[in-house]
Image (cartoon, rainbow, N blue to C red):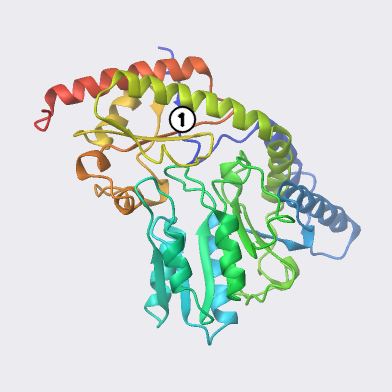
Amino acid sequence: MSEKKIIYLDNNATTRIYPEVLDAMMPFFKEKYANPSSMYSFAAGVHKDVEKARAQVADLINVDPIEICFVSCGSEADNFAIRGITEAYPNKKHIITTKVEHPAIIETFKSLERHGYKTTYLDVDGDGNVDIETLKNSISNETALVSVMYANNETGVIFPIEEIGKIVKKHGAVFHVDAVQAVGKLPIDLQKEDYIDMLTMSGHKIHAPKGIGVLFIRNGTKLRTVQTGGHQERGRRAGTENVPYIIALGKACEMAKAELSKFMEHTKLLRDTLQKKLVDNIDNTKVNGGNANRTANTLNISFKNIEGESILLLLDVYGICASTGSACSSGTLEPSPVLRAMGLPFEYAHSSTRFSFSLDNTMEEVDFTADAVIKIVKRLREISPYTE
């Protein structure tokens, strides 16, 4: 029996490692296995390779390589940024984020709340756009940090980072941006976007392995180390460098920069085609964030009065991989906190389904997926007690 063909449309959760990336990292498991911090020439060669990868990462977002700090993942980078800043400014007890951030941000803010920090969570409107007026009214000289995502992982909605950044700078706070869902999907130039003090990125979102991430720390940013031990990463993050994964991330960043325009054009065509097919053929359908500026590769869509989990289970029968939202907040039957914050009615929030594309995906896959979703929604509505 032949294996079922997999149509992978969950690229916001993770991505396939590119063969070129895998090839780049393999020698560092075998021939080039030295610890880059050691003193002999064998290690010096590996250290040189790590610094080349650091430069490749820096080039993608246009920063000085010394501003790149390698960590294990996006969640660690977020924790490092938030806790590092609050420890660096112990007399400033106010921090700001939004209600639609990744759990790595929200849960860290809640943890600090329990230790006496005043926290402000900015609302979003029905399209997922952040409430700038509340930011203006709540930020003060007592604010240590504002942490806002560049693009939402569930809806793809892009936040007005420049407008937010200029408000933050005016009040002397530190501005951290979680760009895990933006790096490699949008043009990011941190020489021009000089209002961003720190930025998070994650390797496995751009075809590198899981287990490697970056915190960009702009020169001059006051930040306390939160992981102590050795003096790696210029004393900012202790721990022997994960050399193969660093090399892989460097190669993935090099490829992401070369393919950015192609990525944006290709994935937007796929996303818009699937969106139109579903909206045109299924009644009572809502595109979440559809009226906002979105990343090209993300479609979050709801179908009234059916369960998103049922949709995913039936999609799996067809070999189609999608999700109901963030992989880091799944495992619950509650509607997405992002969609709740957007005010999505209960009968739509429970059926949210996210499709996220990469350069691997094809128009044939989109056509197949559209036909499958149309059949699935029809079938589920026929057996739903809530169908009108």
Residue occupying image coordinates x 41% and y 37%: 290
Marks counted in the figure total 1
Pick the quarter of the image with the C terminus: top left
Q: Position of residue 240 (x, y in %)?
A: 69, 63
Circle 1 residue? 9
Q: Quadrant of residue 141?
A: bottom right
Residue 228 or 269: which is nearer the viewer? 269
Q: Position of residue 382 (x, y in %)?
A: 14, 22
- Residue situated furthest right in the rendering: 41
Q: Secondary structure at mark 1?
A: loop
- Residue situated furthest bottom in the rendering: 91
Q: Is residue 382 left or right of residue 7?
A: left
Residue 73 visible from this viewpoint: no
Q: Is residue 285 above or below residue 96?
A: above
Q: Quadrant of residue 5?
A: top left
Q: Is residue 247 above or below residue 225?
A: above
Residue 120 or 19: which is nearer the viewer? 120
Amino acid type, label 1: Leu
Q: Is residue 388 left or right of residue 78?
A: left
Q: Is residue 335 left or right of residue 250?
A: left
Q: Is residue 105 above or below residue 48?
A: below
